[in-house]
Image: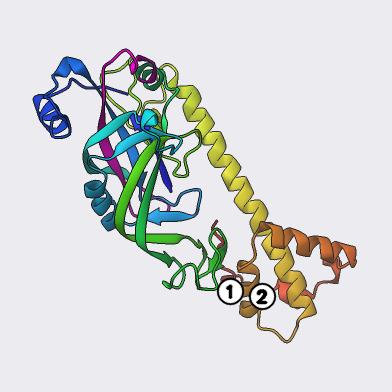
Amino acid sequence: MKEGFVLPESEITSDEDINLINKYTKRELNKNEVYIFSLVLCDNEIDRDYERFTSESLETLAKLFEGKTGILDHDAKSEKQLARIFSCKIQTLKIKNSLGENYKRLIAKAYIPKTQSSEEIIMQIDSGIKKEISIRCRVEKKLCSICGDNINICHHTKGKSYFNGKNQVLCHAILENPIDAYEWSFVAVPTQVAAGVIKTFSNTNQEYDNSLDIIEKFKNESDKKGMKNLYNVIKNMENEIKIGREYINNMREDVLKHLSFFNPNLNNNTIKKITDSLDYEDLKNLQKNFAKNNLVKSQLAPDFAKADSSEFLEFKI
């Protein structure tokens, strides 16, 4: 199950939209009889389940989700059916995902017939109450990002970082070869952070698809009203991330020094590979153990402190 978000109606319904919609209707509807909105179904970013779609998988899903019905909380009862997707496309933004690849997402357009019973759901979409989206689909392969084997049988663990010889990399499942798309649904908390209804701002002529677009725009125009505050928030977050990285680096160096001192027969690079594979909880537990056994810094071998700093590569989260 993957998730997304809704984009509220921000464009005039075109004749092409109506023609596509009428492929799924029993009688021909006109522009005044339908409410159209856009949504992000999923993307190629690592999600909260530590899984991600490839670009090729997104292309396949674009075909599979055309015509699929939208429901509430994945409840397939007929009265929970709310909308239907009538077109899908892949959108590439001018940003990178966490792996350094071009960020891509699957955009869909859906319609809801304008009736007395649908007024409430349309209002909830427009007001942002109904925004987050979750999808259910089936894929043929779930591959480990570390070793390339089936993630369900390899020895790596999703969500844990491993040293690849240069830095730490996050283990996640790569979802390949989608073979079926079941449905999409409005949910409270999506697995994919950027999935849901696309929001349009009423105080500008330009449309922004999600927070990533907004942040980039705000960074470039931080002197405008309301933008400067958000820009400052972003800068504070960046500073906090930097502090967190430095803190973990210090923990790692401290543990490395202790392990090196009490394992003099091991090569420093070997010990560093061991410490680089440890996460925050592992490092914290080791430091507590050192403190409990009075393994203070003053006991460390002076020769290690003079070791060639080139042996210690920068650690990245």
In this picture, residue 298 sits left or right of residue 194 = right
Whether residue 29 can be seen here: yes
| Residue 313 rendering spot, x and y as whole percentages | 55, 67
Q: Mark 2 to mark 1: distance in Å? A: 8 Å
Looking at the rendered image, the quarter that the C terminus falls into is: bottom right
Residue that appears at 77% across and 65% down: 286
Relative to the observer, which residue lies in front, 194 or 211?
194
Residue that appears at 68% across and 63% down: 252
In this picture, residue 56 sits left or right of residue 141 = left
Q: How many marks?
A: 2
Residue to which mark 1 is pinned: 311
Whether residue 197 can be seen here: no
Q: Secondary structure at mark 2?
A: loop
Relative to the observer, which residue lies in front, 294 or 49?
49
Does the residue at mark 2 contact the one at mark 1 (Cβ under 8 Å)? Answer: yes
Residue type highlighted by circle 2: Ala
Residue to which mark 2 is pinned: 307
Question: Which residues make up the magenta segment?
Answer: 96-121
| Residue 281 rendering spot, x and y as whole percentages | 70, 58
**Residue 117 is inside the magenta segment:** yes
Residue 228: numbered disc? none
Relative to the observer, which residue lies in front, 317 or 56?
56
Residue type highlighted by circle 1: Glu
In this picture, residue 287 sits left or right of residue 23 = right
